[in-house]
Image (spheres, rainbow, N blue to C red):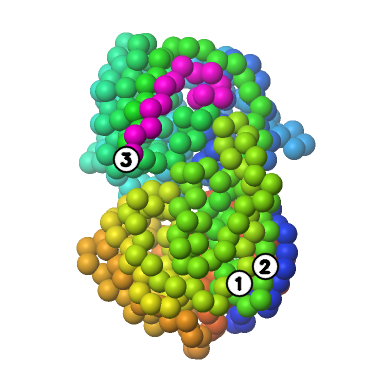
Amino acid sequence: MHNPVKISNKIKKFNEKISVSGDKSISIRCVLLATQAIGISRIYNLLESEDVLNALKSIKRLGVNYKKKKNFYEIESFGLRSLNKLNRVVVNAGNSGTLARLILGILVDNDNEVTLKGDNSLSGRDFTRVIEPLKKFGVNFIVKKKNLPLIIKGTKFLRPINYYEKLGSAQCKSAVMLAALKTPGITKIKAKKSRNHTELMFKELEIPIKVIKEKYYDLIEIRGLTNFNSFEYRVPGDLSSSAFFLVLTLLSKESKIRITNVNINETRTGIIKILNRMNAKIVYKNKKKYKGEIVSDILVKSVNNLKGIRCPKSLNSSAIDEFLIIFLVAAKAKGISTFSDLGELNKKESPRLNIAIKLLKMMGIKILRKNNDIKIYGNPKLNLKGKFIVKNYNKDHRIFMMSCIAALTFGGNWKIFDKDSTYTSFPHFLKIIKQLGADIIEN
């Protein structure tokens, strides 16, 4: 444990306009799809976090070059077969589940062996959910149990598949979509609702894709082996990063914030819908369409009369990365908030549901848990005293940032370890939060 921050004072009122870093999910997809395009792709506002930098290092290990220019990255590639020249390459995905699962999809036609590994946290996560469908394409894996490291050996004789994605995992769905891109014929996917960035990018790049939206599932068809040209993409701001400032503002006194140019894709806005049900008044301004995505400024101000809700399970997948800070709002809301079927939280960088419950109980919040369902008994007068230490949480970036928001809004004397965890997704988190007036001591 190292690099703690200390927070002993609540944040004072603020009224600011900010911008946040580029969307992590889109940044990684841009990098990987650029390796399959013909020509030089330019990506602006690419998130320069550890996850995305590991994506860049990985494609370089696989033989695709990139250059950092003044305000964009260039990636040069020669189409769908660009990665097929090297043998026994080792690729390190670091902490990124998105990178690790998606990169397997573009390696399915590489008949040389590639070893994929990650850090301790990623190596503890289940990869069978992506290995099993990729095997159906004809790909071979060498893996102990179900975790990293693993070896993938693709084939030139890929066959299209029918795939039923039941978990609502955009990572698994996207890995299969990328594999389908390399496969002759039509791959058919029935996927539980989840993030659709890959589908939108396929459409923008004119990759043959058909999407039929049903109530609970999407039916996707992809015709493979169609080359596409290089592209330019300006990555919009990350809603998951913005969410910390939305909650900071809601829970602070007499404060307002405007976050500019944020991606508000409908598969990502669960937190907005949930918070507005809790009596927040979050609004969009300057909404526009870009590359199939919807981008907007987000405005929010402090709220004194937050209320508990029964959160619909239908919003889980569109808020899965934001539940930690939604829990903080529930802790300050009047009444009981109920959340159900949150087992997917424990399959992230850390067992997030378990850790979040532990943190809330440490703050004196009453919580009842039954399996993966929880009830949070809110306390509108919550005002913490005493000392709070946050450590041993697998260096999960979202746990660190959640703890900072709790300290700045609920009070108390906090020591929160592993500030470098923010490099995973949001390297400028502490810088921006200090600009808003937060008193944070870094060691």
Amino acid type of the residue tagged 1 in the rendering: Ser
Left or right: 217, with 277 as reference point: left
Query: From this viewpoint, which residue is outermost toward the right?
Result: 70
Local crowd at mark 1 within 10 Å, few (<14), some, or many (≥20)?
many
Q: Earlier in the sequence, mark 2 or mark 3?
A: 3
Q: How many marks?
A: 3
Q: In the image, is residue 207 above or below residue 13? A: above
Q: Which mark is residue 216?
A: 3
Which badge, 1 or 2, comes first in the chain's sequence?
A: 2
What's the mark number on residue 436? none
Query: Taking 130 as reference, is 332 above or below it?
Result: below
Quadrant occupied by the C terminus: bottom right
Given residues 323 and 418, the one toward you in this image is 323
Q: Please give left or right for residue 249 compared with residue 17 in the image.
A: left
Q: In the figure, 63 relative to 443: above or below?
A: above
Q: Quadrant of residue 225?
A: top left
Q: Nearer the viewer, residue 80 or 50?
A: 80
x then y, percent, for residue 394: 41, 60
Which residue has dot 2 on it?
256
The reply to whether discs 1 and 2 touch (Cβ–Cβ < 8 Å) is: yes
* Residue plotted at (27% across, 39% down): 166
Residue 182, picture quadrant: top left
Given residues 312 and 236, the one toward you in this image is 312
Q: Secondary structure at mark 2?
A: strand
Amino acid on which the number 3 mark rests in the picture: Tyr
| 2 and 3 marks in contact (CB < 8 Å) | no
Label 1: element kind: loop
Q: CA distance from mark 3 to mark 1?
A: 34 Å
| Mark number, residue 302 | 1
Residue 211 among those drawn in magenta = yes
CB contact under 8 Å: marks 3 and 1: no
Q: Which residues are magenta?
A: 202-216
